[in-house]
Amino acid sequence: GSVATKTQRHPSFSSLNADDISYFKEILGEKNVIQDEERLSTANTDWMRKYKGSSKLLLQPRRADEVSQILKYCDSRCLAVVPQGGNTGLVGGSVPVFDEVIINTGSMNNIISFDKVNGILVCEAGCILENLASFLDNQGFIMPLDLGAKGSCQIGGNVSTNAGGLRFVHYGSLHGNVLGLEAVLANGTVLDMLGTLRKDNTGYDLKHLFIGSEGSLGIVTKVSILTPPKLSSVNIAFLACKDYLSCQNLLMEAKRKLGEVLSAFEFLDKESVDMVLNHLEGVRNPLPPSMHNFYVLIETTGSDESYDKEKLEAFLLRSMEGGLISDGVLAQDINQASAFWRIREGVAEALMKAGAVYKYDLSLPVEKMYNLVEEIRTRLGQSAEVVGYGHLGDGNLHLNISTPQYDDNILAQIEPFVYEWTSKHRGSISAEHGLGLMKANKIYYSKSAETVQVMASIKKLLDPNGILNPYKVLPHSLLSYN
Ligand code: FAD
Ligand code: S2G
Ligand code: ZN
């Protein structure tokens, strides 16, 4: 991406030497100190293959005390590091910009405790989201978040990006669901904030600083999280709307008439669905093709199968009569339900198959959201494919532009226009993916100079040598190191 090419390696950071390697081998053991070309190449490259670092070292600590020893040593040697979880991040935050040491949390993947009465899970940061979901499923609980990257992303990465995802409209932000964290600071201090209490008003609630800090304030090593009970009746409908206004009105109706059982509300424009149908094997449109321009996925989760199904069917009938939907199908079994989700969760993968992707994850007022997609489409004309989809229930648009090859001229037509447009409509230039490297210098589109200055002071307090994930999140101009 253009940011990586313009960024200069900070002169205060040291380069690795043989003593460093032997020290890490001493504390971690040979096999957790990786210098193998192949594995380094994977760890240096982000999921979108848009950012590639040149790290010479991948470390795999197994416990928080090893993370502490690594960071204390790196801090004393001024060795920059990049914390890495599942490496599914989409803003270049999880890979080195230059030769930062990669500290991957994947080996810290134990479940520590599960309190069945209160639904409180305590686990290590490297636990993969899907593994936690299946562990909880057997206990009759679910994770309060779900995202297409569940097979690789880790709970430590989810917390560090304050991931949103497909259940956000029902269960809300990780700021509400995370009860406690253990995090290791740059100087090796292990901060035990691993509370499991719903209420604890004793002093500043520091864990919230680490939620969404994208590895720039410390390495999260343990998480304690509130997990909702698994309810028996989950229904999902794949609906077609003639225009975007109908999607909006359907959302308002769903929030009123389905209320507490509404557990997901996702929208896709026709172009997003076509992208999936054209690039992913074995995926077909559950509805007969016709003049529908938008699709909506509605999921309800309740405790009474027949009552909930009736409620949703009545809602769909009324929506059809009212012209809010022009067609729709209710999943009759788990296979059909997964097929509906596959269309929504497959857009990112389909975009990668189609070529170069210019990805924008925006919070916008729902009534304005699709105007931006149409304006970008007008600006780019035939030179690119533009798709708009996302978590309409949370006012979160995923605007993605696709071209066969990457083209700087296309980028120049998108940026800064898309950021200025978002800022003008008082939106956020990062709804859930974070700022990473991609948007490290764009924060002022969504945050005031004074607040960014306080963020930089907190960063300076917790990481005075700036070794934690440098060049990410905050504007490079603000980051002065000792
Ligand atoms: P990584 O990508 O490894 O790291 C992400 C950031 O967190 C980096 O800055 C890294 O330095 C830091 N980090 C990682 N682990 C730690 C740790 N233990 N301590 C401190 N810092 C750490 N995101 C959403 O919010 N909602 C979605 O719906 C969604 N859907 C996605 C679908 C697909 C197909 C893909 C590929 C990605 C999607 N994402 C989504 C983005 C991504 O999955 C999330 O940001 C996820 O939370 C990243 O987790 P990870 O373990 O892969 O972290
Ligand atoms: C989603 C991630 C994929 C993308 O699918 O909800 O958060 O392409 C996104 O933005
Ligand atoms: Zn998303």
Image (tube, rainbow, N blue to C red):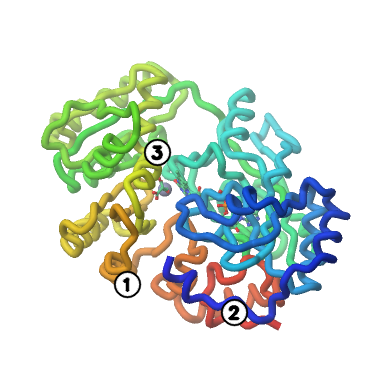
Residue that mark 2 sits on? 479
User: What is the three-letter code of the residue carrying label 1?
Assistant: Pro
Q: CA distance from mark 2 to mark 3?
A: 36 Å
Viewer-proximal residue among 255 and 145: 145
Q: Which mark is residue 396?
A: none
Residue at point 73% right, 38% down? 110
Are there few (<14), some (14-19), or many (20+) residues within 10 Å of tag 1? few
Give left or right: position of 444 versus 469: left
Residue at point 88% right, 55% down? 26
Residue 461 % position (x, y): 70, 75
User: Can you tell which quarter of the image residue 359 is in?
Assistant: bottom left
Q: Earlier in the sequence, mark 2 or mark 3?
A: 3
Q: CA distance from mark 1 to mark 2?
A: 23 Å
Q: CA distance from mark 3 to mark 1?
A: 28 Å
Element assignment for label 1: loop
Q: Quadrant of the C terminus?
A: bottom right
Residue at point 15% right, 37% down? 292
Are there few (<14), some (14-19), or many (20+) residues within 10 Å of tag 2? some
User: What is the three-letter code of the residue carrying label 2?
Assistant: Leu
Q: How many marks?
A: 3
Position of residue 41 relative to residue 422, above or below, is above
Q: Quadrant of the N terminus?
A: bottom left
Residue at point 74% right, 68% down? 16
Viewer-proximal residue among 475 and 146: 475
Element assignment for label 2: loop
Residue that mark 1 sits on? 416
Q: Which mark is residue 345?
A: 3
Q: Earlier in the sequence, mark 1 or mark 2?
A: 1
Report if residue 57 is visible in the image: yes
